[in-house]
């Protein structure tokens, strides 16, 4: 018997580490399921260009230019410039554009402008993304400031309080002459005119532009903006309907196709309602305009897609949580006015991702809860997943890398983490996704977008706090989910260490915390640290010139999580914008420069990458002589650059310019 050698860790560059994930169990699926996953994978890869264009209007042209240099540059490929260029391209691939996937800042190339201009002149012109009348020279004139000038398109998503967030963000969701005030007025008017009880996701699937001084939406649909990519997605989705696991699933996919054809947001809601109610099939997918983190106003949804199948064993764990959803809701420290009387439909499962696409590739979430429409969630519930094979790859890759040894305060705490942290991490993700996001309710008449730019941070904090609070609950031991009453301490320690200290390894010196999940973690950790200071619940202690977190009173820390959960839920339920702003700006944004420097120095000495992403497996159908699929093979060996170039070749669905 031959054993395939499999390494979870792949190449490392800049602040990034590439990982591989396994799709164990795929071979054992029925042929029909394998075929379904194959078609859904193709659909998930076919929208890649949409995301690139959403992330910035020059990204597709830049990608083609850089890839042509990468494959065809005839000069010295070992020169300092070319090596720096390679790292730059790998970062651009990773971010689906020229801005950091997480921090949103534009990458500063470490190769020279001269190198770039000469390289463009030296590669075959027919391989460059030249438009009518354009020469390699004028292409360079267009791209050079975009790549090299730090003042041009400096941020993909700007969240700095006080600025015009649209004008100062480089994402391609609004015309260049549209202001934040105009966009906000446009959408509040649309909301007012709409159905207040069943509001659609206004603005979700369009670019807002000004034509002749008037604002109008350019809808992403078949025949509209991004139509060519959408038609390819539809082609694969239609194939998928033929091998769907059941009639309900076929109806889900058909409804999605209808949405892609019409761009009608009511149809989108109908689709999500069908999707959330289809819980019997083992295979499932997401495909479409989904998360709004890439829009400073939180309206426009970036394109993502993935296919997955249920891990039956691990799902037993999350089903226990879901079955007890009402118990958790009833016993939470939240004011009864903000609780759900009827906590329903939180379906939860552990899945294996089979492919990652769009905004889930190569960096991916490990837990996903959809749909995002508040009224659909309230009326029909939501589907919640934890992606077990990705978590597993993270854990395996992190084993013994020295990180905890450097930052954890003592061996006793280290042993606590060794023993319980993997388990608690999974459980915290389950609680966050299955129960946290699904808990609570808005008071009648409260606008779900009332918290505006602070909405995402508050929502993540709500879900995290729900998870933290309940990890320590005896109910989890009773349900057999945690082995004993000590286990939660591992998560509490890890969470506080991350929120107070180590998550700042992802921030450049002098910068603020911008990303919603990071703001939420800082908010929770610093708020509880400050509010427990008089009782020394959590301390920051110095040993040999290094700062560590010490938790003296885990039980009291749990109460503080409960208090903050209560307040965060109030803010959400009442739509208290002023309070949200005050909390987030005070605890979630700023970084202590001296402490930050120390953490970065200690972290750099470990030579680890703060961000990780995944190389996809490749699926190849096996055909018989009548062109019928008889099997689908899964392979893991593809290199990062080979995969990116293959995707750019095989899934180039859009023109370079999409106006
Ligand atoms: Zn979340």
Image: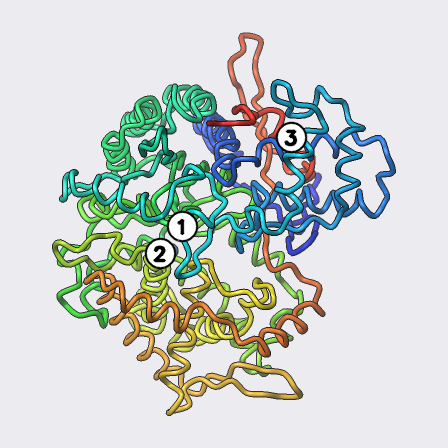
Percent of width and height locating residue 137: 72, 29
The reply to whether the C-beta atoms of the residues labelled 1 and 3 are less than 8 Å apart is no
- The residue lying at 34 percent from left, 67 percent from top is 465
Compare residues 143 and 470 and report the one nearer the observer. 143
Q: Quadrant of residue 643?
A: top right
Say what secondary structure mark 2 lies in.
Answer: helix
Image height of 336 relative to 1, above or below: below
Image height of 56 relative to 535, above or below: above
Q: Residue 453 bears which disc, if any?
A: 2
The reply to whether the C-beta atoms of the residues labelled 1 and 2 are less than 8 Å apart is yes
The residue singled out by tag 1 in the image is 296
Q: Earlier in the sequence, mark 1 or mark 2?
A: 1
Say what secondary structure mark 1 lies in.
Answer: loop
- Can you name the residue that lies furthest to the top here? 626
Q: Residue 580 bears which disc, if any?
A: none
Image height of 570 relative to 139, above or below: below
Say what secondary structure mark 3 lies in.
Answer: helix
Q: Residues within 10 Å of mark 1 (few under 14, many from 20)?
A: many
Q: Quadrant of residue 565?
A: bottom left
The residue singled out by tag 3 in the image is 64
Q: State whether label 3 is within 8 Å of ligand 1.
A: no
Q: Earlier in the sequence, mark 3 or mark 2?
A: 3
Q: Nearer the viewer, mark 1 or mark 3?
A: 1
Percent of width and height locating residue 253: 34, 27
Q: State the separation of the CA atoms marked 1 and 2.
A: 7 Å
């Amino acid at each position: 018997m031959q054993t395939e050698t499999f390494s979870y860790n792949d190449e490392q560059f800049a602040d990034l580490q590439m990982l591989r994930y396994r799709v164990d169990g795929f071979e054992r699926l029925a042929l029909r399921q394998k075929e379904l996953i194959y078609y859904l994978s193709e659909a998930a890869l076919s929208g890649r260009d949409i995301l690139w264009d959403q992330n910035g209007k020059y990204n597709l042209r830049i990608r083609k230019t850089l890839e042509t240099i990468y494959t065809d540059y005839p000069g010295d490929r070992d020169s300092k410039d070319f090596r720096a260029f390679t790292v730059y391209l790998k970062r651009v691939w990773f971010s689906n554009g020229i801005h950091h996937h997480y921090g949103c800042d534009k990458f500063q190339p470490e190769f020279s402008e001269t190198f770039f201009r000469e390289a463009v002149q030296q590669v075959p012109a027919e391989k460059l993304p030249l438009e009518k009348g354009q020469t390699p020279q004028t292409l360079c004139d267009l791209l050079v400031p975009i790549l090299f000038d730090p003042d041009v398109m400096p941020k993909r998503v700007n969240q700095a309080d006080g600025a015009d967030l649209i004008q100062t963000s480089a994402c391609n969701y609004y015309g260049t002459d549209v202001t934040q005030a105009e966009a906000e007025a446009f959408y509040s008017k649309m909301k007012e005119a709409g159905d207040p009880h069943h509001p659609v996701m206004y603005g979700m699937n369009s670019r807002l532009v000004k034509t002749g001084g008037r604002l109008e939406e350019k809808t992403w649909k078949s025949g509209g903006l991004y139509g060519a990519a959408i038609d390819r997605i539809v082609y694969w989705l239609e194939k998928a309907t033929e091998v769907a696991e059941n009639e309900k699933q076929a109806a889900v996919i058909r409804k999605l196709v209808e949405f892609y054809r019409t761009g009608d947001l009511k149809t989108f809601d109908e689709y999500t309602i069908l999707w959330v109610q289809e819980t019997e099939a083992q295979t499932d997918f997401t495909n479409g305009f989904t998360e709004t983190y890439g829009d400073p106003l939180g309206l426009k949804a970036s394109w993502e897609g993935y296919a997955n199948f249920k891990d039956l064993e691990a799902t037993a764990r999350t089903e226990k949580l879901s079955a007890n959803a009402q118990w958790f809701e009833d016993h939470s420290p939240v004011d009864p006015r903000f609780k759900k009387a009827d906590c329903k439909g939180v379906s939860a499962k552990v899945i294996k991702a089979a492919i990652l696409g769009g905004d889930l590739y190569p960096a991916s979430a490990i837990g996903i809860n959809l749909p995002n429409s508040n009224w659909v969630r309230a009326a029909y519930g939501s589907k919640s997943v934890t992606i077990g094979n990705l978590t597993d790859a993270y854990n395996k890759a992190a084993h013994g890398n020295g990180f905890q040894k450097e930052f954890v305060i003592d061996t006793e705490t280290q042993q606590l983490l060794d023993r319980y942290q993997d388990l608690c991490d999974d459980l915290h993700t389950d609680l966050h996704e299955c129960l946290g996001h699904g808990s609570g309710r808005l008071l009648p008449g409260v606008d779900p977008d009332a918290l505006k730019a602070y909405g995402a941070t508050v929502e993540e904090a709500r879900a995290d706090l729900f998870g933290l609070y309940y990890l320590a609950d005896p109910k989890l031991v009773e349900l057999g989910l945690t082995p004993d009453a000590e286990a939660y301490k591992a998560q509490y320690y890890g969470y506080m260490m991350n929120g107070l200290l180590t998550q700042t390894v992802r921030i450049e010196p002098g910068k603020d915390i911008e990303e919603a999940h990071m703001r939420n973690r800082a908010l929770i950790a610093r708020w509880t640290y400050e509010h427990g200071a008089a009782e020394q619940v959590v301390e920051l202690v110095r040993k040999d010139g290094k700062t560590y977190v010490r938790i003296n009173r885990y039980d009291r820390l749990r109460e503080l999580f409960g208090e903050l959960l209560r307040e965060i839920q109030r803010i959400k339920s009442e739509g208290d914008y002023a309070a949200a702003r005050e909390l987030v700006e005070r605890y979630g944004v700023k970084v202590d420069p001296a402490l930050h420097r120390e953490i970065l120095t200690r972290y750099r000495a470990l030579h680890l990458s703060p961000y990780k992403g995944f190389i996809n497996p490749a699926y190849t159908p096996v055909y018989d002589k009548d062109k019928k699929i008889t099997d689908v093979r899964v392979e893991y060996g593809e290199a990062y650059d080979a995969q990116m170039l293959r995707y750019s070749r095989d899934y180039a669905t859009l023109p370079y310019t999409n106006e």
